[in-house]
Structures are given as C-alpha cells and as structure tokens.
Amino acid sequence: MSRRAPRPEAGLLESLSMRVSAWTGRSGAFAAALAVVLLWVASGPLFHFSDTWQLVINTGTTIVTFLMVFLIQRAQNKESRAIHLKLDEIVAALAGASNRLIDAESLTEHEIDVLRKHYSRISHGASAPSRVPEAEAGPRPPRPRRDARRKTQ
C-alpha cells in the first residue's frame, strides 16, 4: 500500500505524525531501533553496566513507547474512519441496500450486540424477524438521496 505525502493544508502536528507513522512502519525504523539497542549493549562494559547505563535505555524506551502509543492510536482511528466512509459509500451506492447500519459505529455496545445476535440468527437460518425492532437498534437514519444513480429497467 502506498502512503501519500501530507497535504499542504494539514497542520504541522498532523503532518509530522503522518511522516513519523510512515517511517516507523518501515524496515529501516526497525533496523535503527535494533542498532540503538546493540550499541547500548556493546557500551555496557565501557560503563561497567552501571545504573546510569541502564537508566539511559529505560528512559529512552519509555519515552518512545509513550509517544508511539498515541501515534498508533491516531493511525488506527484515522484508518477506521476511512474504512467506515468507504463502506458507507458502497452501501449508499447499492440499489436496494438498506442503509440501516451506515452509522453503526455510533451505536452503543448493547445495540451492537443486539444487532450482531439478530444477524447471527439470520445467517444460521434460525427464524428471526425480518426487521430489527426500532427500540432495540435505535432510530433508523434517513436514506441518502439517490438521484444521481442510473435507473434499472
């Protein structure tokens, strides 16, 4: 998968996080991290394996881990939103498709569990109501306009 360069209108922090995410996902980043650890291990005898020597790697790895947690979460959130948008577009473009679940990510965990059980019963051939009750699944979102779609005959 190719990564795009940050757009000029992206803020400084967003641009930086996109570049760091792209770089840390490459083999070169792993090689650099491995080189730092090997250099640290090799320097142990020079510093007599002192507490300060250990503190250097502990502090460095703690800082990197702390920052990476937020970077990974940001990347996952962005990717998840993009996937939802793409799926929503597919559902909206399909003739006859129900848009009932277009905004499913905004449902509560209980509502999602109710829907999952409903569709599980359907997929296993058990008798299930043809539609999910409104009270259990939340209000139905409005259907998007489909004026631009070509008409089938």
Image (cartoon, helix red, strand yellow):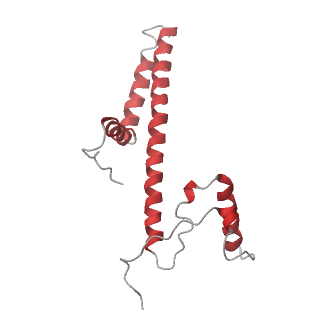
Name the residue furthest left: 8
Q: Is 103 displayed left or right of 32 in the figure?
A: right
- The residue at 43%/62% (across/down) is 86
Side of 80 where 114 appears, left or right: right
State whether residue 104 is above or below residue 47: below
Identify the image quadrant of the N terminus: bottom left
> 135 and 97: which one is in front?
135
Write down the quadrant of residue 67 in the picture.
top left
Quarter holding the C terminus? bottom left
Q: Residue furthest bottom?
A: 153
**Residue at point 56% right, 54% down?**
106
Nearer to us in this view, 51 or 21: 21
For the image shown, how many numbered marks are present on the structure?
0
Q: Quadrant of residue 105?
A: bottom right
Is there any visible trace of residue 116 in the rendered image?
Answer: no
Q: Foreground residue, 9 or 147?
A: 147
Looking at the image, which residue is at 41% across and 30% down? Answer: 33
Q: Residue 135 location, x and y as percent? A: 69, 63
**Seen in the image, is 103 located left or right of residue 120?**
left
Residue 103 rendering spot, x and y as whole percentages: 53, 60
Residue 41 in view in this figure: yes
Nearest the viewer among 152 and 83 is 152
Residue at position x 34%, y 35% from top? 13
**Going by the image, does 20 lie left or right of 126?**
left
